[in-house]
Image (cartoon, rainbow, N blue to C red):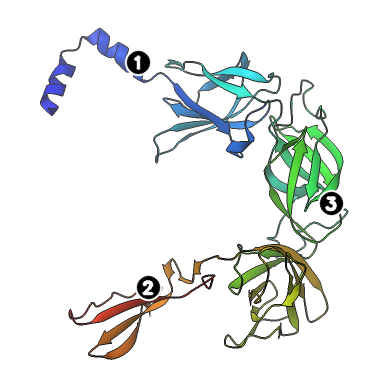
């Protein structure tokens, strides 16, 4: 069959072959989606992926009769698609609009998209005086404080025809942990399609969901650490082992390990209390306490839902945050990228336990399993949490 195909290709006339090749290299658009989050939709000024094939790094993109700013080109090897990162022109009107990609090899057929009036999306995090606000500062001084004026970058806040430093036509609203924040200003920045929205952080320490709303349309959520914030690692189950990290404050003055068989409610003078969704507060058994991390057990009887975590250090400082408690949250403990556990072997009625790993330079590596004779019975015992119910 392969030789037949080759023969047919050989006898195609030169002119037809060139025409077919040129057609194959013409750009093709298969999708256009919001760069920050696909569910946000498309609107004037948003950053978007134009997805298709036969693009190039010097391709141009038109939406309607307006030229888009092309920020970058990428070739995804996994699905074979090509991507152009663009900024939709700020002067576009809501409604249907054709997208056309042009390269030196030709133009794509129009790909029709639907533009909304607003498609708010937050990206790039929060800034105070040009410095990022996050949980990664060595001293914790990078978190926000109530009353601080922060700037967050947003796109999809509507049309603008006035150029840089022009205010949004509709003033957005920002909520931090469900509390309304005062909007100081909302202006078009020097970056194409990007608005800088400045707001004053409302009262309340914690690791808060922050959302922008414009004309009834909500953006994606960014997490903002305020004050001495408690940051949960995932959503644990009742009576499971859980971990929290600290922002802006210190949980303890030293590192202390608790007794895993009988973990105490206070470790090195530090306590952790959980007020569950039903309003009941319980002290959590503590397995490990350090200045920036605590491992604990979610107390028996904790109600499923959003709970408030309050950590009190030995010197009286408080850290607060929220954590979602679930009925089930199965997790396996890991050794590197491998699940932690042991191999249990039963031979001639005698049970032995064998390690799954061995320590050799440069570190811990999986240990090959000896299956033994056919009469051996082998059991793999893995260690996990969040499985009890």
Identify which residue, 272 or 349, lies in the foreground.
349
Q: Within the image, what quadrant is residue 279 found in?
A: bottom right
x 50%, y 23%: residue: 59
- Element type at mark 3: loop
Quarter of the picture containing the N terminus is top left
Q: Which mark is residue 365?
A: 2
x 51%, y 67%: residue: 331
Q: Could you give the CA–CA distance between mark 1 and mark 3, rounded to whole angstroms? A: 57 Å
x 74%, y 27%: residue: 158
Quarter of the picture containing the C terminus is bottom right
Q: Residue 37 location in percent, x, y?
A: 60, 39
Q: Is residue 376 left or right of residue 189?
A: left
Q: Residue 205 location in percent, x, y?
A: 81, 61
Q: Could you give the CA–CA distance between mark 3 and mark 2, rounded to whole angstroms? A: 48 Å
Q: Within the image, what quadrant is residue 144 found in?
A: bottom right
x 29%, y 13%: residue: 18
Reading the chain from its start, which is encountered first: label 2 or label 1?
A: 1
Q: Could you give the CA–CA distance between mark 2 and mark 1, rounded to whole angstroms? A: 53 Å
Q: Is residue 193 positioned above or below 320 on the image?
A: above
| Disc 1: which residue | 22
Label 3 neighbour load within 10 Å: few <14, some 14-19, many 20+: many
| Disc 3: which residue | 201
């Amino acid at each position: 069959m392969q030789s037949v195909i080759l023969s047919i290709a050989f006898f195609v006339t030169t002119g037809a072959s060139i025409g077919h090749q040129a057609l194959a290299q013409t750009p093709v658009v298969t999708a256009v989606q919001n760069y920050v989050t696909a569910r946000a939709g498309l609107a004037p000024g948003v950053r978007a992926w134009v997805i298709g094939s036969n693009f190039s790094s010097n391709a141009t993109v038109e939406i309607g009769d307006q030229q888009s700013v092309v920020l970058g080109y990428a070739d995804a090897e996994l699905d074979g698609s090509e991507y152009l990162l663009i900024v939709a022109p700020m002067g576009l009107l809501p409604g249907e609009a054709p997208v056309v990609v042009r390269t030196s090899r030709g133009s794509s057929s129009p790909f029709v998209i639907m533009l909304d009036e607003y498609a708010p999306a937050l990206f790039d995090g929060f800034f105070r005086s040009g410095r990022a606000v996050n949980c990664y500062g060595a001293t914790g001084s990078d978190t926000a404080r109530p009353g601080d004026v922060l700037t967050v970058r947003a796109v999809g806040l509507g049309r603008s025809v006035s150029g840089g430093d022009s205010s949004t036509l509709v003033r957005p609203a920002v909520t931090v942990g469900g509390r309304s924040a005062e909007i100081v200003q909302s202006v078009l920045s020097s970056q194409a399609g990007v608005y800088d929205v400045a707001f004053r952080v409302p009262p309340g320490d914690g690791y808060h969901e922050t959302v922008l709303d414009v004309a009834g349309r909500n953006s994606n959520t960014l997490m903002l650490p305020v004050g001495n914030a408690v940051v949960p690692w995932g959503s644990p189950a009742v009576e499971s082992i859980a971990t929290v990290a600290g922002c802006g404050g210190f949980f303890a003055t030293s590192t202390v390990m608790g007794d895993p068989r009988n973990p105490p409610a206070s470790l090195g003078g530090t306590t952790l209390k959980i007020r569950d969704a039903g309003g009941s507060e319980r002290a959590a058994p503590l397995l490990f306490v350090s200045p920036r991390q605590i491992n604990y057990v979610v107390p028996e009887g904790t109600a499923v839902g959003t709970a408030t975590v309050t950590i009190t250090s030995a010197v009286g400082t408080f850290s607060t945050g929220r954590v979602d408690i679930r009925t089930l949250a199965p997790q396996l403990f890991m050794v590197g990228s491998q699940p932690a556990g042991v191999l249990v072997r039963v031979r001639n009625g005698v049970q032995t336990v064998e390690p799954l790993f061995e320590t050799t330079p440069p570190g811990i590596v999986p240990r090959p399993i000896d299956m033994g004779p056919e009469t051996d019975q082998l059991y793999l015992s893995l260690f996990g949490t969040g499985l009890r119910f």
